[in-house]
Amino acid sequence: MKHKRLYLIGLIAFALLSLLLPTDVASAADLSSSIMTKQLAGSLSQADWSFPCSDVPSPTGGLQPSEQIISQDWLSGDVPSLSQDKTISGVGHLFYTYNNDTQDLPQVQTLFKVMEGLAFLLITPSIMLLGYQLMVGASTFRYAGALEGLSHVALGILAVVVSFNLVHMLIGLENRFVSGMIKMHSEHPYPPIVANSIPVPYRLAGEPITSYRGIVMPMSRWGCAINDFIGMFSVSFMANTLGSVIPLIGGLAHLAGQVTNIADLIRRCGEMTLAVLSFLLWVQVFVRIILFNYYILMAPLAFGCWALPGGVGQRVVRLWCKGFFTVAFSQGVQVFVLTTLPLILPSLPEIPGDNQGIMQGLLLQFPLILTLSVTLLVPRVLGTSAAQAFGTAGSMAGGVITAVGTAASQRG
């Protein structure tokens, strides 16, 4: 009887539990669905992104470049030549060649000692040959060949010893030359050229007269230009068309559809063009530093070839001098173009009836794009484009091998 009662109580409890269980499960499912919905919404809101932009809110509304940030730009920032602060380092590589990027770089100093040792090793057989010629000349009284070889060996040894100091002096001379260009820019700033009463933006808002950052866009503002350029496209194109191919691109959809008129469209296109040209200029400056370090390391070997007999090493020295000087002073020529080209441009024409500001927008962007484009052509004109520079460097390295082989065959 007792077992029957326990069995009956168990059945009643099971029935009550079965009635209550669906409600609890539904509540748990609803709670889980609510949590997942919130997480999905959070992930979608976090998917919106944009390229890094250093612009800050302006007092009049909108955005303006942050002088504190762009003055520290790697490419066009302030350097000791532009500022009284002599502790500035690592910025403005377009206008200044820093020792810690070239001859003071630890890797360069270590490898330079190795190359210097190889240069002296290259000269050693020439010294032995010179001693042999002096011994032979003592018995035959013919010192002409020995005296010629002595001058080559002496000059070769001296050149190898002073090669590092020579490079240091030439880099300092190049920095002084660029500093002179910048001082000339401070005395003769960009002229106030206008297009339909609107001045050409050679300088950014709040910039000093020695700044070039209105033409050479700082690296921290490249993202600003890309964000503005995306505003030319429609939201559906960014979210659906491009977003279906590259889902990550859909996060830029909130930047799309921001163009208000045709003048704004032209401004965004011109800004993006300056960003692309500034990127190409950054590539040139970066490659220039690499070539600088290469010529520094090759200096002992190139000068060591001067000591080789028969004049077989003079071509190597000429190639080194040509390559080093063109790489070094192409920077000064580029700054010279940036400084002087806007000064010699004629006045922009007035365009009557330009109610939409189409021609005005084009004319405002034209001087900036023209100046930066000509600046990029300087290495090609001087023969220091990437292909030509690396070709000269390769010819110099091949010349070292050829000179050594020719000298060895002559000794044989």
Image (tube, rainbow, N blue to C red):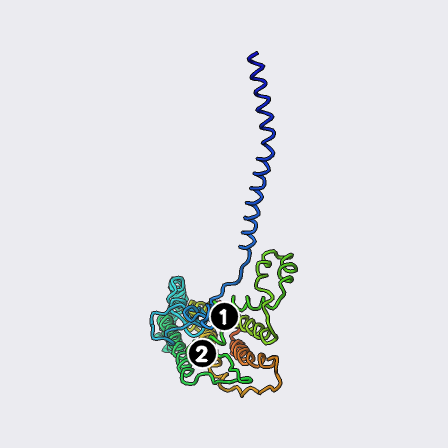
Instruction: Name the mark on residue 332.
Output: 2
Q: CA distance from mark 2 to mark 1?
A: 37 Å
Mark 2, other Cα within 10 Å: few <14 / some 14–19 / many ≥20: many
Question: Could you say which is closer to the camera, residue 315 or residue 386?
Answer: 386
Task: Reply above or below: 253 against 382.
Answer: above
Question: Could you say which is closer to the camera, residue 61 or residue 325?
Answer: 61
Residue name at image x 61 percent, y 75 percent: 262
Mark 1, other Cα within 10 Å: few <14 / some 14–19 / many ≥20: few
SS label for mark 2: helix
SS label for mark 1: loop
Q: Left of 347 or right of it: where is 96? A: left
Q: Left of 111 or right of it: where is 371? A: right
Q: Position of residue 271 (x, y in %)?
A: 55, 73
The quadrant holding residue 25 is top right
Residue name at image x 48 percent, y 76 percent: 214
* Amino acid type, label 1: Gly
Contact check, label 2 and label 1, Cβ < 8 Å:
no
Outermost residue toward the right in this view: 241
Reading the image, the residue beneath label 1 is 62
Task: Reply above or below: 179 against 122.
Answer: below
Q: Position of residue 108 (x, y in %)?
A: 40, 64
Outermost residue toward the top in this view: 1
Q: Position of residue 255 (x, y in %)?
A: 57, 64
The quadrant holding residue 30 is top right
Q: Position of residue 319 (x, y in %)?
A: 48, 74
